[in-house]
Image: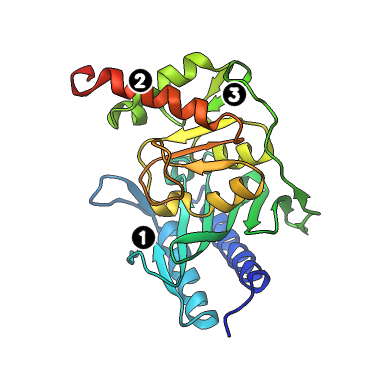
Amino acid sequence: MAPGIFEDLQLALDLADMAHVLAVDRFRAGDLAISTKPDRTPVTDADQAIEQALRAALKDARKDDEVLGEEYGGEARSGRQWIIDPIDGTTNFLRGLPIWATLIALAVDGDPILGVVAAPALRRRWWGARGHGAWAATVTERGTGAPARLSVSKVGELSDALLSYNSLQGWDDAGGLDGLLALARGCWRTRALGDFWSYVLVAEGQVDIAGEPDLKVWDMAALVPIVTEAGGRFTSLDGHDGPWHGTALATNGRLHDAALDRIGLAASHSGPAGR
């Protein structure tokens, strides 16, 4: 008999505790080992150690489940699959910036049903499970504080919206800068908060729209249930649901179609010659 969602969520939270200890031990360490992967992105010994530890724990606790992770691979599978990003925001981690987190998701037939985001340097943790809401709590050396239920903002007009877009260079490199600028021009304010943080802030109601043009499934899977259980929407930049399409747009739901329209209209007007 398959475990219930609360048992799986508790396991994910336990894995987050494990990752927290390993990551804090290596954060700002003078002997942090850094190398470059074939895709020219950095990887640290902390990324590798965390994923190895989580895979080992899952092998013991859920031996029949598949695992897909950033550092040690795997393939998308039907059935139950854990999706892990040991450190989302590796560049921040290796530079000593506090905006990084471990992302842990469980997908069933490709659909993320729960997600946990553990950000030790921010002293925050976020989680969501299908049908059971999205939550956040403060995490300190004394333990985890009382969880608070999350809810997206009620902003209904782009002209009142706060947009977080990660980096101009990333959008430009992906050929999406025209779409980003079209969306940004319609919004009240923009920020480049970056990585997982933009999306959990959408779930908290502090940011109204977040998006990125070049992502992997492990960057997004844990964020989907957190955003959607808080009342928001999470799609690709062309409107497909879920984390499997290489791009992300998360909103409070009310603004989603307008944001998609802005991005899509700019892309159709720019075309190949627009670059």
Marked residue nearer the N-terminal end (1 or 3): 1
**Residue 266: numbered disc:** 2
Q: In which quarter of the image is residue 144?
A: bottom right
Would residue 271 appear left or right of 58 to someone viewing this image? left
For residue 194, above or below residue 132: above
Residue identified by numbered label 3: 162
Marks 2 and 1 sit apart, C-alpha to C-alpha, by 35 Å
At 62% across and 20% down in the image, what residue appears? 157
Q: Give the camera-side residue of 42 and 26.
A: 42
Q: Hey, what amino acid is under mark 2?
A: Ala
* Residue at image point 60% right, 54% down: 118
Q: What is the x, y in percent for residue 158?
A: 57, 20
Q: Do the residues labelled 2 and 1 touch (CB within 8 Å)?
A: no
- Quadrant into which the N terminus falls: bottom right
Tell me where residue 262 appears, x and y as whole percent: 44, 22
Q: In this view, does 56 lie to the left or right of 230?
A: left
For the residue carrying disc 1, how many other residues have a C-alpha within 10 Å: few (<14), some (14-19), or many (20+)?
some
Query: In the picture provided, is 24 more to the left or to the right than 246?
Result: right
**Where residue 232 sits: x, y (%)?**
61, 41
Residue nearest the viewer, comparing 213 with 272: 272
Q: What residue type is labelled 1?
A: Glu
- Single out the residue that lies furthest toward the right: 146
At 40% from the left and 25% from the top, the residue drawn is 263
Total count of labels:
3
Circles 3, 2 touching at the beta carbon (< 8 Å): no
Q: How crowded is mark 3: few (under 14 residues within 10 Å), some or many (20 or more)?
A: some
Between 26 and 2, the one nearer to me in the picture: 2
Q: Which residue is drawn at 55% across and 80% down?
A: 61
Circle on res. 71: 1
In the rendered image, the vertical position of residue 15 relative to residue 208, given as above or below = below
Q: Quadrant of the C terminus?
A: top left
